[in-house]
């Protein structure tokens, strides 16, 4: 009973802390909006789940089974990424609030602590899933194709497909936090890369998200009604323009047949999640400061006494200090030295990145040379996204560096810091973007691609401005790491034109998308100035 009470206390405390954060509310709002978009009206010019032929689009009637499965597939895919960023701060919070020091003095085992945090994370993510489930119910009534509510058909996909995934994400978040090399920005980027590139491949082998089983059931029902339907030509995701000049054919699908074999694959995820949470307890320090204390306790007492005697003998009484006014030269401000100092800080952080370490500068130089020598389309579509992803951990610290190093009181109390220090930080970030992407810029200039150069300029200013604005307003580097990684993956990597903020897609340049991001840059820079002004006033 005592252990159960301890687990309940860990779960309850962590749950209340997480659901009160802006991250939770923003992620929940984004998931609900995505669920709304994923159920398009019949007149929409985009498709999210259908089968396509040259003349016809085939999809199910918006009944409880279809809506529940559609939104569940989206939620499982969406929250496995966003949910990780919401819940992966339990250990960090205990360290920062010094609750971990109290935990270290208790008989609480590592396994109980990590399992409790994993269950806490699962409770938070399950709350999101429950709210999205209610949204799916509202979407069925809102679309109005079939108003009869079948509660089990609507709920079963969330229980079977989504909740095991949430438990796995909750356990992985704890595992990352208990491994020093995977904490913070490094872990965020590693998880994002695993989600973007490894999980889709792995899901085809194991059907991690349940997509293959659901689409197979849907396609079989549609083909029984429309024999010409090709099950291999399914669409899952946003596809624009496919509704034009195509007839819409509807069929009624009553849900997945939840066979024991299908349920066993989901139970495997539950077992893996429990195993991951227990693995996280292995070699976890349990907030024990014993390595430091051993160093102190291992020092001979005589040595400590000698040190104290030396310190006492070298104490010199202070003489009377006379203050004199500063001269005019000392009161003058020079912007260039401050800008150079900020640039040196950025270069130092680039060479100390945990992912690239001492090879950070060499990797940046290699990307610059490759971007200059490759054909322009390849340089712009491949090398520029890579060049502007390398320094993401450096940009994410913009606006938060003062708080991280506890120099905010000194910086904010200096004369005209808003007009002097913040522009230097912003320009240093812009110079970093210009330097790492200079190879593609020179390549564009050599080919006379002036629209591409303008798009490059918009990207070089937009990225550090977004980092600075998010850092000032949120006080955390996590928000930029997540938002930028998502934009980078959906826009330049997956060729979504309106999210191409760096001009990597030829179509977005022809459409003038870079103008939008220049406007957004000006707005974000203004918001960053307002946020920093509020910070200075609070100090």
Image: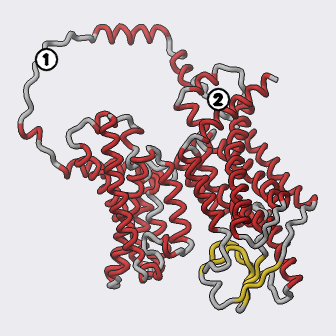
Q: Is residue 394 visible?
A: no
Give the x, y percent position of residue 435: 34, 64
Q: How is the image coloured?
A: secondary structure
Instruction: Report crowding for label 1: few under 14, some 14 to 19, many 20 or more residues within 10 A (C-alpha).
Output: few
The residue located at (37%, 58%) in the rendering is 524
Question: In terms of image quadrants, where is residue 117?
Answer: top right
* Residue found at the far right of this picture: 260
The front one of 378 and 231 is: 231
Q: Nearer the viewer, residue 29 or 516?
A: 29
- Whole-percent x, y for residue 517 in the image: 39, 68
Q: Which residue is mark 1?
A: 321
Image-based side of 7 in relation to 331, left or right: right
Rendering coords of residue 470 (x, y %): 43, 51
Q: Is residue 229 visible?
A: yes
The residue drawn where x is 57% and y is 48% is 25
Determine whether, in the image, residue 402 is placed left or right of residue 79.
Answer: left
Q: Residue at x 33, y 60 (%)?
A: 430
Tell me whether the residue at label 1 lies in contact with that at label 2, contact meaning CB atoms closer than 8 angstroms: no
Residue 150 position by quadrant: bottom right
Which badge, 1 or 2, is on the more N-terminal residue? 2
Compared with residue 102, is residue 79 higher up or lower down, i.e. above or below? below
Viewer-closest of 66 and 427: 66
Quarter of the picture containing the C terminus is: top left
Label 2 belongs to which residue?
A: 286
Q: Residue at x 68, y 33 (%)?
A: 12
* Inter-mark Cα distance, 1 to 2: 49 Å
Q: Position of residue 245 (x, y in %)?
A: 65, 91
């Amino acid at each position: 009973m005592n252990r159960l009470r301890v687990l309940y206390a860990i779960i309850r405390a962590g749950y209340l802390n997480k659901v009160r954060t802006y991250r939770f509310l923003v992620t929940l709002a984004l998931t609900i909006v995505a669920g709304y978009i994923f159920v398009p009206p019949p007149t929409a010019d985009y498709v999210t789940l259908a089968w396509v032929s040259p003349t016809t689009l085939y999809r199910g009637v918006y009944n409880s089974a279809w809506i529940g499965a559609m939104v569940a597939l989206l939620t499982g895919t969406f929250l496995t990424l966003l949910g990780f960023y919401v819940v992966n701060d339990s250990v960090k919070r205990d360290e920062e609030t010094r609750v971990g020091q109290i935990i270290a003095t208790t008989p609480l085992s590592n396994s109980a602590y990590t399992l409790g945090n994993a269950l806490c994370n699962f409770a938070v993510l399950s709350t999101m899933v429950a709210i999205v489930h209610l949204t799916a119910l509202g979407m069925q009534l809102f679309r109005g194709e079939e108003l009869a509510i079948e509660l089990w058909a609507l709920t079963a996909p969330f229980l079977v497909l989504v909740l095991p995934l949430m438990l796995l994400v909750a356990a992985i978040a704890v595992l990352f936090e208990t491994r020093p090399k995977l904490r913070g920005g490094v872990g965020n980027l590693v998880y994002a890369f695993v989600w973007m590139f490894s999980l889709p491949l792995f899901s085809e082998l194991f059907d991690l998200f349940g997509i293959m089983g659901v689409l197979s059931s849907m396609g079989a029902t549609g083909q029984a009604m429309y024999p010409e339907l090709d099950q291999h030509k399914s669409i899952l995701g946003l596809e624009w323009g496919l509704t034009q000049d195509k007839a819409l054919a509807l069929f009624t699908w009553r849900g997945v047949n939840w066979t024991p074999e299908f349920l066993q694959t989901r139970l495997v995820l539950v077992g893996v999640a429990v195993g991951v949470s227990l693995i996280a307890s292995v070699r976890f320090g349990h907030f024990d400061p014993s390595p430091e204390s051993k160093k102190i306790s291992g020092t001979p007492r005589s040595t400590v006494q000698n040190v104290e005697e030396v310190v006492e003998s070298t104490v010199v009484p202070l003489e009377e200090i006379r203050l004199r006014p500063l001269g005019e030269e000392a009161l003058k401000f020079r912007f260039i030295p401050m800008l150079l100092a900020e640039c040196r800080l950025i270069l130092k952080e680039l060479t100390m990145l945990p992912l690239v370490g001492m090879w950070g500068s060499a990797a940046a130089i290699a990307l610059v040379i490759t971007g200059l020598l490759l054909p322009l389309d390849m340089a712009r579509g491949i090398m520029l996204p890579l060049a502007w992803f390398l320094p993401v951990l450096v940009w994410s610290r913009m606006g938060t560096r003062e708080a991280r190093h506890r120099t905010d009181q000194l910086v904010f109390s200096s004369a005209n810091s808003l007009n002097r220090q913040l522009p230097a930080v912003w320009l240093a970030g812009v110079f970093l973007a210009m330097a790492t992407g200079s190879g593609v810029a020179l390549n564009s200039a050599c080919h006379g691609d002036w629209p591409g150069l303008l798009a490059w300029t918009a990207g070089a200013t937009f990225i550090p401005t977004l980092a600075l604005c998010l850092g000032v307003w949120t006080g955390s580097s996590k928000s930029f790491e997540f938002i930028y990684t998502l934009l980078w993956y959906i826009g330049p990597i997956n060729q979504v034109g309106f999210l191409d903020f760096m001009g990597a897609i030829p179509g977005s340049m022809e459409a003038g998308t870079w103008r939008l991001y220049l406007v957004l840059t000006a707005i974000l820079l203004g918001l960053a100035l307002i946020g920093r002004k509020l910070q200075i006033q609070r100090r």
